[in-house]
């Protein structure tokens, strides 16, 4: 089943280390962070531009993959909801999806604004925001 | 490295079978399709609603994972560009990201509009479009 193995291409460097204290969304106080890519992926970064927004895909390595229903935002007043109808990190394939503004690029290090991912989170992919001609 | 193994949660049923003939974007003639989830994930679907748009994450199992630079849309007039600055399917972790409208839900089968993924493509995740309260 090699086809279903992920290859982390880098990791997040962030002051966030505690899942319980981390913001749930980037507009809730997420700090700036560095995306540190492995050197071998430098060619794949060609064309990324400071000042633009990109989609960042991460692997939420501290998630519980056996959770199928949650109370959104941990609110006990809300009904149990299927994880596919929520953004909860606990889910069968805990892929984090983040829209981040690129602030600066230094070799294979990319500085981004307002990222709610924890320090050392593996990076899976970067994609442009969807535009018809890409 | 079990933490980096994906667990496909279902697959796409679509009339699209040929990558070369498939539309590159959903607004380029992508057909309606069925998302067929494994029965064990039925609880995780609770809360999905016909008429709403969701993000669908797939594993583009026919992609070349060693490609790091491409000419966008295969256009030989365009310069080689890093895959992280394009939506090309060929990339180290070929995760497909699709916004689809849910047309109907029948048990663990979900009918969606305009999906450019090929028949039998593995499904990884479904997420709501980001709203502040999810």
Image: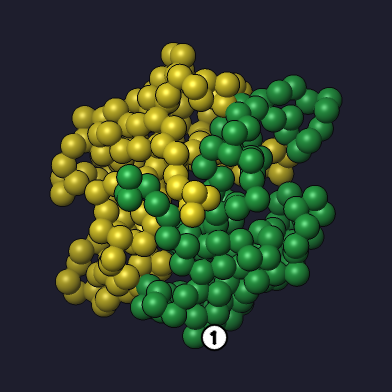
Chain colours: A green, B yellow
Residue A72 place in picture, x, y as percent = 73, 33
Quadrant for residue A53, please give it.
bottom right
Chain under callout 1? A
Location of mark 1 (residue): A106
Residue visible at 57% across and 21% down? B43
Residue A83 in view here: no
| Quadrant of residue B17 within the rendered picture | top left
Q: Residue at x 37, y 47 (%)?
A: A4
Dividing the picture into quadrants, the one containing residue A103 is bottom right
Q: Residue furthest top?
A: B106
User: How far across and how far down the image is residue B11, in percent?
Assistant: 35, 31
The relative height of residue B75 versus residue B18 in the rendered view (above or below) is below
The quarter in which the C terminus of chain B is drawn is top right
Name the side, left or right, on which A130 lies relative to B128: left
Residue at the image point whose x is 69% and y is 30% from the top? A70
Q: Is residue A66 left or right of residue A77?
A: left
Vertical placement of residue A116 versus A101, above or below: above
Residue occupying image coordinates x 61% and y 23%:
B47
User: A66 or A71, which is in the foreground?
Assistant: A66
């Amino acid at each position: 089943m090699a086809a279903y193995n992920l290859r982390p291409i880098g990791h997040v460097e962030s002051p966030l280390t505690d899942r319980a204290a981390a913001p749930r969304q980037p507009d809730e106080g997420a700090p700036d962070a560095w995306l540190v890519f492995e050197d071998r992926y430098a060619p794949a970064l060609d064309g990324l531009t400071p000042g633009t927004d990109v989609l960042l895909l991460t692997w939420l390595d501290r998630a519980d993959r056996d959770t199928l229903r949650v109370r959104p935002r941990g609110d006990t007043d809300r009904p149990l909801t299927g994880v596919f109808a929520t953004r909860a990190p606990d889910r069968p394939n805990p892929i984090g999806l983040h829209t981040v503004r690129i602030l600066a690029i230094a070799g294979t290090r990319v500085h981004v604004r307002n990222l709610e991912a924890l320090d050392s989170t593996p990076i899976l992919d970067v994609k442009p925001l969807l535009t018809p001609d890409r």
